[in-house]
Image: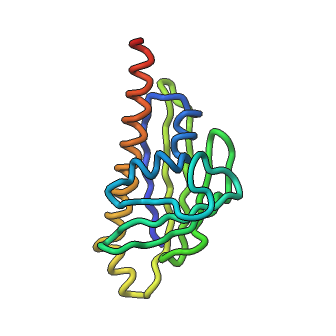
């Protein structure tokens, strides 16, 4: 089992960070590099408890699909997406949002298992963990940039 744990500090209210993090349209925009598309289930807007989304994106030179269910949800502090169908043995991504003095602490805790025994573990250690970490970091930077600039523009008007 592999765990990726990230913290991102964002100068924006917790409700805004929570909502943009579950916004399918924003995810598509922020993941243009991997050509992410929502192809089934909830395909636009804000996903919520009990809803599914099936993603199709280009990773490692091929198109892969990944279907997730929002299995836990407490507005505006946490939600969890779990893989229903995809290429992992297990995949659980917990999103946590804490109010701090100047905005929000956004925490990602991604726990997953890879299939294919020793070869899968080797692929994970050499390539996959770095790929997933970079994907999440870039996504979090996009959220931070968007919200902080939006709020900065509001303040200057």
In the rendered image, residue 104, in percent from the top left (x then y), is placed at: 50, 33
In the rendered image, residue 43, in percent from the top left (x then y), is placed at: 57, 56
Please state if 38 lies on the left or on the right of 78 as rendered.
left
156, above or below 76, in the image: above
In the rendered image, residue 8, in percent from the top left (x then y), is placed at: 42, 41
Please state if 100 lies on the left or on the right of 77 as rendered.
left
Work out which residue is located at the far right of the displayed protein and give it. 50
In the rendered image, residue 100, in percent from the top left (x then y), is placed at: 52, 29
Instruction: Pick the residue in front: 75 or 30.
Output: 30
What residue sits 32% from the left and 64% below the top?
A: 130
What residue sits 60% from the left and 46% below the top?
A: 46
- Please tell me in which quadrant of the rendered image residue 151 appears: top left
Instruction: Pick the residue in front: 32 or 148.
Output: 32
What residue sits 38% from the left and 62% below the top?
A: 132
Work out which residue is located at the far top of the displayed protein and give it. 157
125, above or below 82, in the image: below
Please state if 119 lies on the left or on the right of 88 as rendered.
left
The quarter of the picture where the C terminus appears is top left
- Please tell me in which quadrant of the rendered image residue 36 appears: bottom left
How many numbered discs sit on the rendered protein? Answer: 0
Q: How is the image coloured?
A: rainbow
């Amino acid at each position: 089992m592999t765990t990726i744990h990230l913290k991102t500090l964002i100068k924006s209210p917790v409700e805004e960070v929570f909502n943009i993090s579950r916004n399918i349209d924003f995810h598509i925009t922020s993941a243009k590099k991997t050509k992410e598309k929502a192809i089934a289930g909830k395909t636009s807007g804000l996903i919520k408890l009990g809803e599914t989304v099936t993603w199709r994106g280009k990773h490692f030179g091929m198109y892969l699909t990944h279907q997730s269910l929002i299995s836990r949800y407490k507005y505006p502090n946490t939600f969890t997406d779990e893989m229903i169908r995809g290429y992992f043995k297990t995949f659980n991504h917990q999103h946590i949002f804490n109010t701090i003095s100047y905005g929000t602490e956004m925490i990602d805790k991604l726990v997953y298992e890879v299939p294919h025994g020793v070869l899968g573990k080797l692929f994970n250690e050499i390539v996959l963990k770095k790929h997933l970490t970079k994907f999440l970091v870039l996504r979090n930077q996009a959220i931070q940039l968007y919200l902080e600039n939006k709020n900065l523009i509001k303040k200057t008007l």
